[in-house]
Amino acid sequence: LLQIDHYDPHDDLKTDSVWFSLIVPTYNEGKNIAALIRLLTTMLDQVLWDNYELIVVDDDSPDLTWKIAQGLMSEYPQLRVMRRCSERGLSTAVIRGWQAARGEILGVIDGDLQHPPDILLSLLTQIQQGADLAVASRHVGEGGVSNWSLTRRFLSRGAQILGLLLLPNVIGRVSDPMSGYFLVRRQTLIGKRLSPLGYKILIEVLGRGNIDKIAESGYVFRERKEGNSKVTWKQYIEYLHHLLRLRLSQGRVGRLKRSLKIPISQLIRFCLVGLSGVFVDMAIFYLFSDPNALGWGLTRSKIIAAEVAIINNFFWNDRWTFGHITANQPGWSMRLKRFLKFNVICLAGLILNVFILNFLFNVVGINRYLANFIAIGLVTIWNFWLNIKLSWRT
Ligand code: GDD
Ligand code: MN
């Protein structure tokens, strides 16, 4: 049973309680583990003295990571090692670690040095300041990835968007729902039955925990120097399965609506800006395509008109609709990033628009203008929702 309970000091294995328990799940990390443990303990010793524990949960790695870790225990008194022989998998390893943990604050970090240990300090501070969950994120502040291929970035973002569509109230709460580097209060998980699948434990915590206040710290996902990633196609399938299962377990529409929390005044501004874009589009379209003006071809003119309208809309949204957010995110590179995201989302919206229009007109048989009106309405909501989750995040 994968359930987190109160820490009971009378349990045989557990002795004194500590404030913070950090789990390091490992599978064939023999070349990384010693360096990671040294970095973590040097840092944590300074801020928490001996009020923490590190728990390596190893799935009986063929490279004997567990044995190497056990060898370090005499040098590092805060270190514990769990060798699992009957169970496998990243998520269950983390939960088993938390079950054995004695801390009030539970955390997880990868064992391959791809998660920079120093971010732990800001995560701990955020928890001390009252957050229930503190997530290290690749998508806020200075966060990012080192040199991921376009394919991997695309897959990662695609997985996130899919999650937003299927489980907006879970995936939409953090900028990096795939993160495997976070801290959470034990209190929020007590009595909850966790049944994660595969890799994405944070989704399970967000979906089933009683989590109110969330904080995020940006970090750069480093390149792996030693050993290999264990991610294969299987993990993507498991992720989908996981999303669907959580989705089904949630049900209730009322809760979904409440947690969507659509900011109405921003939506109204967004729609007004969208309307201004229609006029810009029309004007440019006229200018390029009309035989009395430039007289260019229809498609070419339309593409230019759409792009100019997108630029117009971006300008007003960045200044006005989401001005309260962009005030804290100045700088041209940030602005360019927001613009590119907005552009991609709008273009995807355009494709969606064409599909919906065709569906309503040809399949459902609705009047073409009404069909177009509905399509525009739906796509506006799509654009708005994805943009507040990806381009203009609070
Ligand atoms: N105990 C145990 N059992 N540990 C495992 C297992 C397992 O079956 N599979 C992987 N691990 C450990 C690895 O040894 C490593 O310490 C950590 O889990 C992450 O595994 P990687 O295979 O290195 O994952 P990654 O680098 O592709 O993915 C990371 O990035 C994601 C963000 O995109 C992980 O940090 C994910 O947690 C994170 O969500
Ligand atoms: Mn890794």
Image: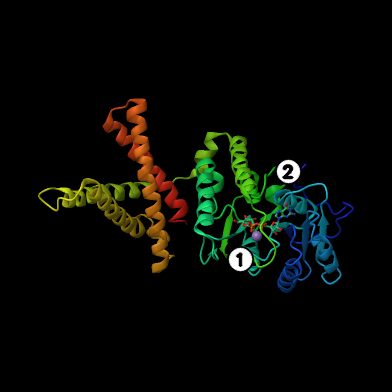
User: Quick check: 364 above or below 249?
Assistant: above
Give the quadrant of residue 72.
bottom right
Where is residue 319 shown, x and y percent of the image? 34, 60
Q: Is residue 366 left or right of residue 17?
A: left
Q: Taking the image as four quarters, which one is ligand 1 found in?
A: bottom right
Q: Is residue 106 left or right of residue 206?
A: right
Q: Which residue is nearer to you in this view: 306 or 19?
A: 306
Is the shortest distance between ligand 2 and the CB of mark 1 under 8 Å?
Answer: no
Q: Is residue 290 left or right of residue 253?
A: left
Local crowd at mark 2 within 10 Å, few (<14), some, or many (≥20)?
A: few
Where is residue 25 shown, x and y percent of the image? 73, 57
Local crowd at mark 1 within 10 Å, few (<14), some, or many (≥20)?
A: some
Furthest residue in direction top, as rendered: 365
Identify residue for label 1. 223
What residue is rendered at 54% in x and 61% in y? 148
Do the numbered discs 2 and 1 sit on residues whose CB atoms are within 8 Å? Answer: no
Q: Secondary structure at mark 2?
A: loop
What residue is rendered at 62% in x and 42% in y? 242
Give how far apart the Cα atoms at labels 2 and 1 are. Answer: 37 Å
Q: Is residue 111 left or right of residue 382?
A: right
Identify residue for label 2. 191
Please tell me the numbered disc located at residue 157. none
Q: Look at the image and tell me whether residue 265 can be seen.
A: no
Where is residue 247 shown, x and y percent of the image? 58, 38
Q: Look at the image and tell me whether residue 240 can be seen.
A: yes
Where is residue 325 shown, x and y percent of the image? 42, 60
Furthest residue in direction left, as rendered: 292
Q: Secondary structure at mark 1?
A: loop
Give the quadrant of residue 56.
bottom right
